[in-house]
Image (tube, rainbow, N blue to C red):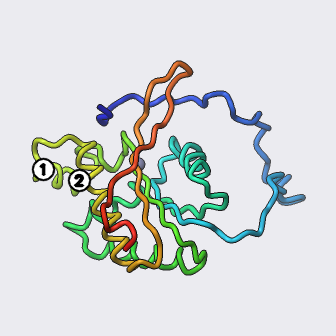
Amino acid sequence: MGDAGTPGTTGPVGAEPKLQPPLTDDQLLKDGYVSQIPWVDKPADCVVVCCSDHRFEKQNEDFVRALGFTSPHFVQVPSGIAVFHGLVAAAGFLPKAMGLLLDKAQDVTTAKTIIGLGHSDCGSYKLGSVKIVAEVARRLVGKDVREIQIEHLEQAGRAIALRLGGSAKVRVFYSDVVDTRDGSRVKYIPVDLGRHSRG
Ligand SMILES: [Zn+2]
């Protein structure tokens, strides 16, 4: 069970680059900063809508690459695509705004695949932290947070597929933190959208 409240590992796993002392304002004024990561001018091959939780950021990128995409266009918002559904009950305007945001992302990228990602221990789903979610949870008594999240992902995925009307394929995944011999890792499982996944 990947229930909320599982303590996450806080430190990096050891693959972090060595930290330089932070740039000073004087250095920035004088020279600016040139990132040593090469800039590649390549069209995006998918749009990824995911939670902005920093603890899952690198793993999300790794997973999307494992799916075969090399130039993902990330749209990161708290709770990820679940905002399409999770908050719909009380704030009808929000999913609309998200829909427009998604249209925009698709416009600028012309990507034909939309990937929605959700994750365990999501701040937006911690009971009490967001009134609306607490409200939703209360109406769905008997279900745990994980079930509610997966249900929201599923419904959000279907809503996006309907909105896109077949112009893009929608794939949705839920991720859990799992213990492995090498420490905590993030495991992704597909969320079934049925016949809706292709719009
Ligand atoms: Zn989250």
Which quadrant is home to the N terminus? top left
Q: Amino acid at mark 1?
A: Leu
* Residue 58, horizontal then vertical, whole percent: 59, 44
Vertical side of 37 occupied by 75: above or below? below
**Which residue: 24% across, 44% down?**
127
* Residue 13, horizontal then vertical, whole percent: 61, 28
Image marks 2 and 1: residues in contact by CB distance under 8 Å: no
Q: Earlier in the sequence, mark 2 or mark 1?
A: 2
Q: Give the label on residue 18, or none.
A: none
* Residue 9, horizontal then vertical, whole percent: 49, 28
Residue 13 horizontal side relative to residue 157, left or right = right
User: Going by the picture, which residue comes out furthest to the front?
Assistant: 195
**Which residue: 77% across, 69% down?**
41
Q: Give the label on residue 140, or none.
A: 1
Q: Amino acid at mark 2?
A: Val
Q: Nearer the viewer, residue 18 or 149?
A: 149
Vertical side of 23 occupied by 104: above or below? below
Q: Residue under label 2, please give it.
A: 133
Residue 46 horizontal side relative to residue 43, left or right = left
* Residue 90, horizontal then vertical, whole percent: 20, 67
Q: Nearer the viewer, residue 38 or 172?
A: 172
Give SS at disc 1: loop
